Image (cartoon, rainbow, N blue to C red):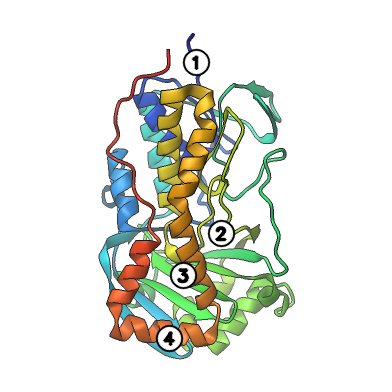
Amino acid sequence: MRQQDPLILGAGPAGCAAAIVLARGGAQPLLLDRAQTVGDPLCGGFLSWRTVEQLRALDVDPLALGAHPVTQLRLFAAGREATAPLPHPACGLSRHALDTALRQVAQAAGARLVFDHITAIEPGVAHGKAQDWPSESLFLASGKHDIRGTARPRHSDDPALGLRLRLPATTKRRDLLTDAIELHLFARGYAGIVLQEDGTANVCLALRKSALAEAGGSPQALLARLAAQEPALSHRLGDDWNTARVESIGAVPYGWIARDTAPGLFRLGDQAAVIPSLAGEGISIALASGHMAAAHWLDHGPEGAPLYQQAFARKARRPVAVARLARTLAESPRAATLAALAARYAPQAIHALASLSRIAAPPPLAQPARPA
């Protein structure tokens, strides 16, 4: 009996990767997103070398999209600065550019793209504002945003938050940030900064809720306090940062991994495993999960969902655990100082940490037989 084509909820990296692999395997997936205009989501502006390999396997070349080359890590902690070469070249690329390219490849492969705002999920159906979308195979790729009926557990006395602002291109920022991804560590959080394809600087912060609460709950007040305490960060923020829009996302369940699921429900990306952003491996997790979920569906249909989820949980366990440990250490001023010293005098330790926090990439895209 012919399997009903899958419904993919979310046209970001995870959803598009699944759509591409499914379509190339003979399926006709329906890719559903809430926004017809491609946005620029908060997370994912840095692409590791592993991520670049995965994207090229999907016929998306970040450098051809104008991605900003990155060859070194620059670390700032407790007044110290250290620079270490990355094991392999990486790059900075906006999610707008990346997601636009992935959508185009998915549609060219045969996926159909439609738009609706999904408000709830029940077995076999996604409820949208425009209509209900029945499917025996739902691929949940909604990123860090939960949908009613599939919410991830959140248990933390001091949950993690994410903040992002995009700073305009200037000569000063270009000179400061050329060819580097920067990590600025501070108590209970860190900021990552990288240039993107248009010369703008993407500034992402991951921090504890208590750190924001001490600034009166105001992201602007928090950034002003950090700028006053951290001269290097202040130089990157410049005099125009307070005119930029600050985006936020709350209660990010860093370290969570989906270890099982119901038949027909495939969890992808951040709905499968939430790796701390310090590792720079979120997009790689998304792509790998989309690829693996699609391969399991092509081999087993809806019944392949539990098999996929368990296999992906095993694959994600080590990189998520290593990144979680690195994040915990980065939030401690004493440990952050040691990290700066390691980056300066023992860069091989940084390389080892980077390698351990990378998810094993899937093999080159195959053309598995579609279920009859």
Mark nearest the camera among 2 and 3 is: 2
Q: Are marks 1 and 2 in contact (CB under 8 Å)?
A: no
Q: Quadrant of residue 162?
A: bottom right
3D distance between C-alphas at marks 1 and 4? 54 Å
Q: CA distance from mark 2 to mark 3?
A: 19 Å
Distance from the alpha carbon under mark 1 to that under mark 2? 34 Å
Query: Badge 4: how crowded within 10 Å, few (<14), some, or many (20+)?
Result: some
Residue 6 appears in the rendering: no
Residue under label 3, please give it.
Answer: 192
Residue at left 49%, top 83%?
335
Residue 358 in sight: yes
Residue 129 in percent (x, y) is at 71, 30
Q: CA distance from mark 4 to mark 2?
A: 23 Å
Q: Are marks 4 and 2 in contact (CB under 8 Å)?
A: no
Q: Within 10 angstroms of label 1, few (less than 14), some, or many (20 or more) residues? A: some
Give the structural element (helix, strand or loop) at label 1.
loop
Q: Which residue is mark 1?
A: 3
Secondary structure beneath label 2:
loop
Name the residue tied to disc 4. 338
In the image, residue 367 lies at what x, y percent?
30, 25
Amino acid residing under circle 2: Gly
Badge 3 local density, few (<14 within 10 Å), some, or many (20+)? Answer: many
Residue type indicated by callout 1: Gln
Reading the image, the residue beneath label 2 is 255
In space, the residues marked 3 and 4 are separated at their CA atoms by: 18 Å
Left or right, residue 50 beside residue 261: left
- Residue at (31% x, 51% y) in the render: 52
> First in sequence: mark 3 or mark 4?
3
Q: What percent of the width, then of the height, locates residue 361?
A: 34, 47
